[in-house]
Amino acid sequence: MRARVSAMHKIISVVAFVALFSPIFSINTNAQMMSKKKMGKLTKDQKILHVLNRLGFGAKPGDVEKVKAMGLERYIEKQLNPDSINDSEAQAKLKNFEIINMETAEIFAKYPNPGALLRMLNGNGRNNRRNAQNRRNNQNSEMNPEKSQQDQRAERRQRRRQLIELYQKYDLKPANQIPLQVNASRIVRAAYSDRQLEEVMVDFWSNHFNVYMNKAATRWYIPSYERDVIRRHALGNFRDLVVGTAKHPAMLFYLDNFQSVSPNVNRNNNQRRRAQRLLNNPRAKERFIQRLKQQGLSDEQIKQRFEQLKNGGNRRNQRGINENYARELMELHTLGVNGGYTQDDIKEVARAFTGWTIFDARGYRKAAANMIKDVEQDRQLIRQARQFGISPNTESGTFIFVDRLHDQGPKTILGQKVNEGGMKDGLKVIDILVSHPSTAKFIARKLAVKFVNDKPSDKLVNRVAKAFQKSNGDIKTTLRALFSSPEFFAAENYRAKIKTPFELLVSSVRVLDANTNGGPAMVGLLRNMGEMLYGYQAPTGYPDTAEDWVNTGALLQRMNFAVALASNRIPQTRVDLRQFEARNKREILDKAIDTILNGEISNGTKSTLIKQIDQPLIEPKLADSMDDDSALTMGRNGRRGNRMNRQARLRSPSGNPEVFKVVGLILGSPEFQRQ
């Protein structure tokens, strides 16, 4: 009974704490600006902190002094040229993340698609359908439902055992480790890289050109997408980013453009010819009937199959133009929702991008290349490669352009005629869109929201847009215009933005000089706060304004993370808080405020913290499930049973309770949550 009362007391205490802070987070913007205008201009130290918070993920111990010695302008210029910065510390910490340097075909082979392995176990795609039909027939004829369920469970257990044997025999790794490595490596880079602006821009562009990792085969493409497109061009040229994302299998798969083909393409010609030869050959026809009977098909089902053949085969898989990518290219990537395009423009842009596709998009061939004995699937892919006019040795998951799938003929986009032919049609469309004035304003506004405030003025946006246009989309030039603007260093914009969960997590690691490898528990806490990287299902990507992140539930999860970090409960993450130890709680609080907040705290926040340091904190915890993947999940060496939430359990607290309570509260305070 006492334990229940104590737990309830802790919950009430933390809810009350968050409730006290919620109004501070939600301060009226105008009132906030009025109070900050009284500050006048920012001091030299405040300007340095502002740059470290906006061009990076916050200051590490000693960063302010380094920038002072270097000079603020020189620091900004070096950040704009990341190749000039030695980044050996971060690179050393990334050595254990093999996936970030692997090609897509290698990932398909090492972290196979479970569907590919199931195909191997059951033969090929046709055998899968045959076995599924047999199972349905058996279930329909089974009079005892309980026994039928037992059979299904036994079948699932058998498949699981077979999969485990394959993982162990061929030293394979489960596909659900892909998102873990992607998220962990990003946390490590952002926390330890001295190329802070590059990491901020990788975060920015990965949301601008968002793809959803949990859509079918998309996750296998994320490492290459981030490395070869987003990171490579993060501070380069905007057109290169658009072309790179348009061609990359991650975007092609996520928005279904790899399935977009001209409606004039008859994809069933070969199937029709094969069907006709079968129908005209009595011996072949009889063999075909016998095979169907062996599969368990009834006479009526065989009759239906022959009707399909007479009509040219199964038409379910016929494909036409898909407008998803065309719409998002204009609405989210370039022009913006009010950029001046019409539905007709969407249709014409979709026509221009037909034939942009992926060879073996789900990686079935590569995943089972060394194991499959029935090579029918491989033969099908070889035939497909020849039809597409590419080498049969083309790697799984490779972008290809197939001219015969392209919608030929002239298109009209935004009043301009496009008739370059083949793949050049899509490239011409990109040229039109990236050079359009609406694109310059759309990108300028998004960058101003990111680096200045949630509601930038039209004057600022127009100046930045002009720099974007004059430089033909050069990202460095555009950012220089933004960072040199009077609005960037205006007092009302100092600590005016709310950190996203990813920014909060990384800035907390940096300010406490924590040692982490971004393990499963850290990724799980990031997910609890609502920002699993590449985990946003809509094409918009995660938002970047306070109204999207500030609510009671979100603040509770942020406090949950802050306490877990400060109390050393996160496995594979360590903090040393001995520097904050003092004679009493008030002195600990003062030390922590000086170190973590640089002494900048409102009277209201400090008063709340003083009241709260005598109250208990709830036990931080992870969500019940960290793994969206319904496929088989395994631990190291292919052993079954270790789902990621089990691997990510939090530890018991360690360290001085009075110290980690104070530090956790400060990390959860409005002052630290702002940047």
Image: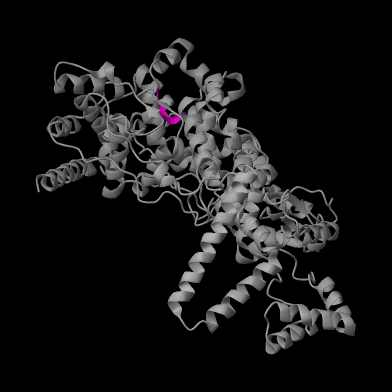
Q: Quadrant of residue 403?
A: bottom right
> Does any portion of residue 329 appear in the rendered image?
no
Q: Residue at x 69, y 49 (%)?
A: 247
- Where in the figure is residue 436, as x and y percent of width and height? 63, 48
- Where in the figure is residue 5, as x and y percent of width and height? 11, 46
Q: Which color mode does the image show?
A: one colour
- Where in the figure is residue 287, as x and y percent of width and height? 83, 79
Looking at this view, is 258 or 361 the one in front?
361
From this viewpoint, which residue is outermost toward the top?
69
User: Is residue 16 rendered to the left or right of residue 404?
Assistant: left
Looking at this view, is 74 or 146 the one in front?
146
> Does any portion of residue 558 appear in the rendered image?
yes
Looking at this view, is 674 or 284 the one in front?
284
Q: Based on the picture, tell me whether residue 57 belongs to the magenta stretch.
A: yes
Q: Residue at x 61, y 53 (%)?
A: 113
Magenta segment, prevailing SS (helix, strand or loop): loop
Above or below residue 340? Residue 499 is above
Which span of residues is magenta-colored?
A: 53-59
Give the number of marks: 0
User: Is residue 215 rendered to the left or right of residue 519?
Assistant: right
Quarter the C terminus occupies: top left
Looking at this view, is 529 or 141 the one in front?
141
User: Is residue 653 rendered to the left or right of residue 260?
Assistant: left
